[in-house]
Image: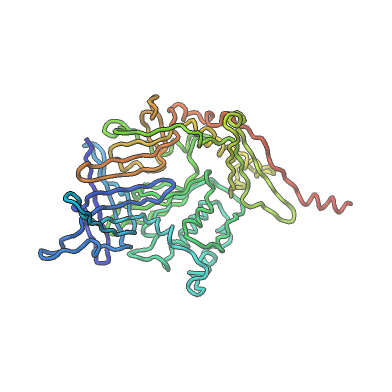
Amino acid sequence: MVYTDVRVKVWTQSGLLTLTDVVRSVQVQDGLDTLPQGSVLLPLHRTVSPSSRKRYSELITVGDLCLVEILAWDGKRGDWEAVLHGPVVEVEETEPLGPEALPGTRLGVASMAHFLAQDAVARWMWFGAVEGWKPVESRLSIQEMNDDPSSVVYRYLKKVAFHTANWNNGGTLEDFLHLDLDGLKAVGPFSVELQLAEGPHLEIVKGLVDYPLMELYATTDRAGSLKGAHTSQAGKAPGEGRAATVVRMRKAPYPYPTTDEWQALPLHVLEGEWRPVRSRAVAKTDQAVRNFFLLYPALPFIDEYLLLAIGVAVANRRSIQRYGYRPMKVRTHLIHNESHPGPDAVVETTKALTMRMAAQWNRLHEMEAGTLELPLAPWIRPGHRVRAESLWGEGKREYHVRARALFWDPQQGGRMTLAVERGLPLEVYADPGWFAKGLEVVRAGTEVTLAELWKGAKRE
């Protein structure tokens, strides 16, 4: 049996408000494609003195900060886990009719990454003040804006998005957000002109992430558990040391060209008290089929001596014959790195990246995907691995967690649903060659040296 409990705190303009003893239910969702969010259901009123009550809508307002923690314990393992920390974005009251209906207050809660999705850069604001019309150019040099993508994202968030001119409510964004940024390395010019950028910070930095070669997402994790090339660990919830919203950028960790990145993901074995229960959902579909892959530079490098136009394509001819032409075309900033020195560096880099992308998506439709329902295990987060019985009942499988939904109420306790993908037998994940089966390079771009053309024109 798994014992579960919740703790909810809100930092209001009048001080800390602890809601743990009055919570009627909690729901939290987060995933690789969505920012963490949730809701907390409370009674309509709170007794503030022996002679008076106030509505929770009078005590809590939009913009207050909320922390939700969940405990799951089977007598041997388990601890309090922060599952959501961020602003209250909605306060809603309901007073339904009927003898069994209970009036209540629902708090809509977002993560701290919500501010990155809302707080924006606008060149025209503040009458031309530096925080408004040139915040990027004033804080980042040209050299700092032309580097590998994770380095540029780190500098942008640290020097631009985390500045104190816009959001400062009990602390700055740097106090409440952790950065765990890593990715594939590159040397090359970017098509994103950050000094001219406008819009929410999150959308600006997403322009530097080459999906599906790399991924950028936010989740809620414990402080101190972060690993990456560029890591910030400043953030703590007010009065706490456990909560942290993490903005994570990573290279897609799926098994190719090796399984090292996949094996490095946290692994959770769903057995014993935490084996999947109740219901499952699984389906086979051709929607994931991709069989022609093209990677091309985001910005061609041009000067008076060299014009480089390179595109590399990889195809699975058998898959095309079976399913029809299903292309995946990706524009990349990853033009060149130091692992392929010499005159063919760009071509070799592009070939390696295209094959990596192709292998990671080549046989996705052959992998299991679906949903698992299990007792509450709040330490399982999007981006982790889980090992469980096959959704089709065909032995053990290892899955990638795409998203999760957590539920808790005093009557039923806690439970959670995992959206999982890339389910394969354990022995398959030990063989990266399985993922590249049927792939071949079918075309490479050309290189034209303008200096040679210029010399030829002079000779004529």
Viewed as shown, does residue 52 lie left or right of 167?
Answer: left
Establish if 94 lies above or below 317.
below
Establish if 319 lies above or below 204.
above
Residue 238 picture quarter: bottom left
Residue beneath the point at 31% across and 57% down: 237
Q: Residue furthest front?
A: 98
Residue beneath the point at 44% across and 49% down: 217
Residue 192 picture quarter: bottom right
Q: Residue furthest left?
A: 50
- Total number of numbered discs in the rendering: 0
Residue beneath the point at 46% across and 37% down: 262
Establish if 206 lies above or below 430.
below
Viewed as shown, does residue 60 lie left or right of 162?
Answer: left
Residue 385 picture quarter: top left
Viewed as shown, does residue 70 lie left or right of 302?
Answer: left
Residue 316 point in image, percent of width and height: 60, 32
Residue beneath the point at 51% across and 46% down: 183
Residue 331 point in image, percent of width and height: 59, 47
Q: Residue furthest top?
A: 394
Colour pattern: rainbow
Q: Residue furthest right?
A: 460
Residue 451 point in image, percent of width and height: 78, 52
**The N terminus sits in image quarter:** top left
Residue 336 point in image, percent of width and height: 62, 47
